[in-house]
Amino acid sequence: METYVCLSKYFCRAFFEASRTGLFWLLLLGTIIAALLPRLVVKFVLQNYFPNDIQICREAEKLENSRVVEAGQTEMQPIPDATRI
C-alpha cells in the first residue's frame, strides 16, 4: 500500500522521474536564487547608497568602537570605573 497522497498517478510518476535528474535540482536551485535576487539587490542598494539615519548611526558606532592595532588585533576598550560615577 502506498503511503503518499497524490492528485494523479501520472503526475506523481512524472515528478519522481524528473527529480532523479541533476537538471531538475539545478533548475530548482536556480529558481530559488532568481526569486531571492531582486530582494537582495534592492536591500543592498538601499543600505549602501540611500542609508537611513539608524543605519548611519550604527555604522558610526561600529567605526568608533573598532580600534585595530598591528597584526589585525583589536584593542580592548577601557572599562569605566564605577566608583567615579
Image: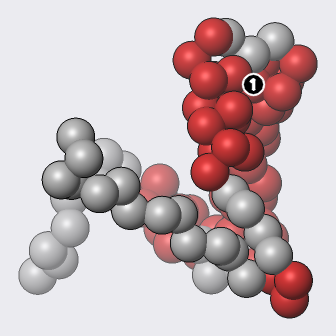
Rendered position, 22 above or below 65:
below
Q: Position of residue 42 (x, y in %)?
A: 77, 22
Q: Is residue 76 left or right of residue 59?
A: left
SS at badge 1: helix
Q: Is residue 24 left or right of residue 15?
A: right
**Nearest the eye: 84 or 10:** 84
Residue farthest toward the front in the current orientation of the protein: 84
Image quadrant where residue 19 sits: bottom right
Residue at horizontal 86%, vertical 88%?
Answer: 71
Q: How many marks?
A: 1
Q: Which image quadrant: the C terminus?
A: top left
Image quadrant where residue 1 sits: bottom left
Residue at horizontal 63%, vertical 11%?
Answer: 53
**Nearest the eye: 2 or 32:** 32
Determine crowd level at label 1: few under 14, some 14-19, many 20+ residues with C-alpha closer than 10 A: few
| Res 19 seen here | yes
Q: Position of residue 13 (x, y in %)?
A: 48, 68
**Nearest the eye: 62 or 42:** 62
| Residue position for label 1 | 47
Q: Position of residue 77 (x, y in %)?
A: 53, 63
Residue at horizontal 75%, vertical 25%?
Answer: 47
Rendered position, 40 above or below 80:
above
Residue at horizontal 65%, vertical 73%?
Answer: 75
| Res 31 seen here | no
Q: Position of residue 25 (x, y in %)?
A: 69, 69
Q: Amino acid at mark 1?
A: Gln
